[in-house]
Image (cartoon, grey):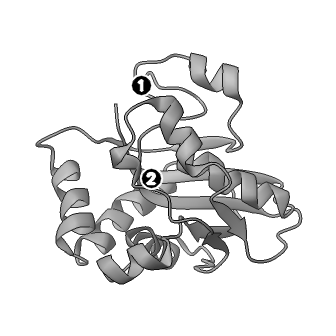
């Protein structure tokens, strides 16, 4: 702390200017760690995503499960941020799905791996420079595969940079009837 009550942006008390001006679709993002260079969390996420170290996913999920055990977060269903099929073919796995599946096992939560679908193969968020460009890059990039009327959902990812991806997922879920969408990621970029 302090961090934004909506997007978990560090160093902000209450709600950050961006979230006040743009009202993200996601109700709240939770991220217990900061994604800062040379930290063990940074190394773990980088190795999972870019070096194929799948064995890191259960460890990261364990950290999230332990964190959730100390919080009052009520959810009906967990959904990982989906990868586009092209990215899935090149990487061989969806790191968010690996983390979500293990989190579900450890925290006793029901996981729906195919609930969210990525509809566009947008450039990687890493290649986007500004806050605004990251939001525009993922806008309308997701769809919900089934009705989720009245359900409280938790969207899982490895890393949150601006909250754009989580908000785009939340928008698709709310269009399908979700009553509440929270996001959780292992880490938040400063």
Indicate which disc residue 185 carries: 2
User: Considering only vertical position in the picture, is 15 above or below 7?
Assistant: above
Q: Nearer the viewer, residue 20 or 31?
A: 20
Direction from residue 22 to residue 148 in the image, left or right: right
Note whether 91 is above or below 189 in the view shown.
below
Examine the rendering and report whether any part of residue 77 can be seen: yes
Q: Is residue 146 left or right of residue 188?
A: right
**Local secondary structure at mark 2:** strand
Q: Do the residues labelled 1 and 2 touch (CB within 8 Å)?
A: no
Let me know if residue 72 appears in the view. Answer: no
How would you rate the neighbour count of disc 1 (Cα within 10 Å): few for under 14, some for 14-19, many for 20 or more? few
Percent across and percent down for residue 15 are: 60, 21
Residue at (56% x, 75% y) in the render: 108
Q: Quadrant of the C terminus?
A: top left
Image position, residue 160 (x, y; %): 43, 46
Residue 2 x, y percent position in the rendering: 44, 21
Residue shown at 58% from the left, 79% from the top:
113
Left or right, residue 151 beside residue 55: right
Q: How far apart are marks 1 and 2 (CA)?
A: 16 Å
Question: How many marks can you see?
Answer: 2
- Dot 1 or dot 2: first in sequence order is 1
Q: Residue 118: image x %, image y %?
A: 59, 68
- Which residue is at 67% across, 44% downward? 26
Which quadrant is the N terminus positioned in? top left
Of badges 1 and 2, the one in the foreground is: 2
| Depicted 54 relative to depicted 186: above or below | below
Task: State the mark number for residue 66.
Answer: none
Q: What element carries label 1?
A: loop
> Which residue position holds label 1?
1
Residue at horizontal 28 percent and vertical 42 percent from the top? 35
| Residue nearer the viewer, 83 or 121 | 121
Neighbor class of circle 2 (other Cα within 10 Å; few <14, some 14-19, many 20+) is many
């Amino acid at each position: 702390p302090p961090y934004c009550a909506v997007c978990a942006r560090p160093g902000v008390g209450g709600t950050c200017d961006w979230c006040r001006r743009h009202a993200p679709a996601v109700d709240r993002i939770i991220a217990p760690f900061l994604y800062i260079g040379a930290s063990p969390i940074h190394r773990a996420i980088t190795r999972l995503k870019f070096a194929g170290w799948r064995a890191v996913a259960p460890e990261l999920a364990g950290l999230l499960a332990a964190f959730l055990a100390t919080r009052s977060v009520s959810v009906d269903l967990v959904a990982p941020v989906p990868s586009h099929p092209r990215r899935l073919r090149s990487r061989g796995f969806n790191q968010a799905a690996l983390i979500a599946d293990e989190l579900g096992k450890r925290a006793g939560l029901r996981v729906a791996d195919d609930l969210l679908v990525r509809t566009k193969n947008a450039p990687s968020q890493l290649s986007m420079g500004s806050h605004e460009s990251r939001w525009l890059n993922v806008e309308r990039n997701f769809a919900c595969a089934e009705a989720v009327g009245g359900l409280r959902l938790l969207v899982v990812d490895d890393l949150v940079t601006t909250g754009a991806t989580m908000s785009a997922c939340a928008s698709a879920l709310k269009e399908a009837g979700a009553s509440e969408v929270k996001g959780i990621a292992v880490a938040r970029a400063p």
